[in-house]
Each structure stands twice: as C-alpha cells, then as structure tokens.
Amino acid sequence: MVGAVGLRLGGVSEIESRLAELGLRLPEPMQLPPGVTLPFPWVRVHGGRVFVSGHGPLLADGSLAGPFGKVGDQVTPEQAYQAARLTALAVLASLRRELGDLDRITAWLRVFGMVNTAPGFTGTPMVINGFSDLILELWGESAGSHARSAVGQAELPFSIPVEIEAEVAIDG
C-alpha cells in the first residue's frame, strides 16, 4: 500500500520502490552556478515538520534542467509541467538526504509553486500539477494531498521555469 509509513520491501523504502517502478531516479545535489552561494539549508527540520526551500528542476547529475525562460513564451506549458515533475524529484532527493528515508514523511502539508511566466500566461495551476500529480502518485490521497498555491512570477533564479517549496510532516 503506497503511503504506509515504515513499510519495507526487501530493505528498500516503499516510496523509493515506487519511484523505481515508475522508472524515476532522484538527482544528485544541485550544482550551483559558478560564483553562487546560498546561506541557507535546502531542508530545515523542526520537530515533526520539515520545511523545504525553493527547488528547481534538476538533471540526474544535479545540474539545472532546461528548457529555460518564461512559460508561455520560450517554454511550453507541457515542458513546464515536466519541469515541475523534475522539481518534485529534486525536492524528494533533498528530503531523502536530510531524513534518510522518504517513508518518514507522514503527510504533505503545503506546496508553493512559482512559475516564470510570460505576460498573459494564466495556466500556472496546470504547470504545478506536474509536482502535485507525482506526490499524489507516490503517497496517495491520504498522505499526498496538500494545500497549494501556484503563482506567476516576473523572473525566477537562473531563468528556470518553475521553483517550488514545500512543507511536510514526519514521524519521530
């Protein structure tokens, strides 16, 4: 059963088994562009809550994934949906590194999605569905359902099309 905390399939976490079944792989940590430093953690655990800093789409090696630019101009909504899905994998990779086990996540509480939009583009909810759809597929409705915002922004760092932050609940 997807979403049951602590279930192990042959010593591998249930969520990671599900990712493998879907043919998905968590990326390496983000490779920051030259000269960029970030004075904050990607993940902050406080009691039973975990706050995830804004992440963008990554390739398997941790480099930023294209296409780059504004959704509705240089990036299609379909490409942006896929970028949001890649962003979900980047968030999961950071959570895995910090928590040691994705099965510790008992609920997805909140997701804040930002889309680098061209003037007039209003399809931000459909873009951020790329993130939400994957979380719901992995955790199911009970644990994966989350409060969410999907807003357009004039610019995002490094011209990425999507940036997403989140909050989850964990067990002990």
Image (cartoon, grey):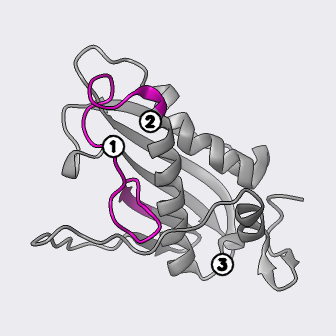
Instruction: Give the mark nearest the N terminus, 2 or 1.
Output: 1
When asked about the image quadrant of residue 65, the answer is bottom left
Q: Work out whether 106 lies above or below 133.
A: below
Which label lies toward us, 1 or 3? 1
Which label lies toward us, 2 or 3? 2
Does the magenta portion include 59? yes
**Residue marked by disc 2:** 79
Q: Which mark is drawn over residue 149?
A: none
In the orientation shown, which residue stands out farthest toward the bottom?
Answer: 11
Q: Residue at x 43, y 21 (%)?
A: 123
- State the predominant SS element of the stretch in magenta: loop
Circles 2, 1 touching at the beta carbon (< 8 Å): yes
Q: Secondary structure at mark 2?
A: helix
Does the magenta portion include 4? no
**How far apart are labels 2 and 1 at the CA level?**
7 Å
- Say whether residue 108 is left or right of residue 126: right
Say which of 96 and 159 sits in front: 159
User: In the rendered image, which quarter contains the N terminus?
Assistant: bottom right
Where residue 52 appears, x then y in whole percent? 43, 62
Q: Secondary structure at mark 3?
A: loop
**How far apart are labels 2 and 3 at the CA level?**
30 Å
**Residue marked by disc 3:** 101
**Residue marked by disc 1:** 67
- Say whether residue 67 is left or right of residue 133: left
**How far apart are labels 1 and 3 at the CA level?**
31 Å
In the orientation shown, which residue stands out farthest toward the top?
Answer: 120
Say which of 117 and 78 sits in front: 78
Q: Which residues are magenta?
A: 52-78
| Residue kind at label 2, given as amino acid type | Gln
User: In the rendered image, which quarter contains the C terminus?
Assistant: bottom right
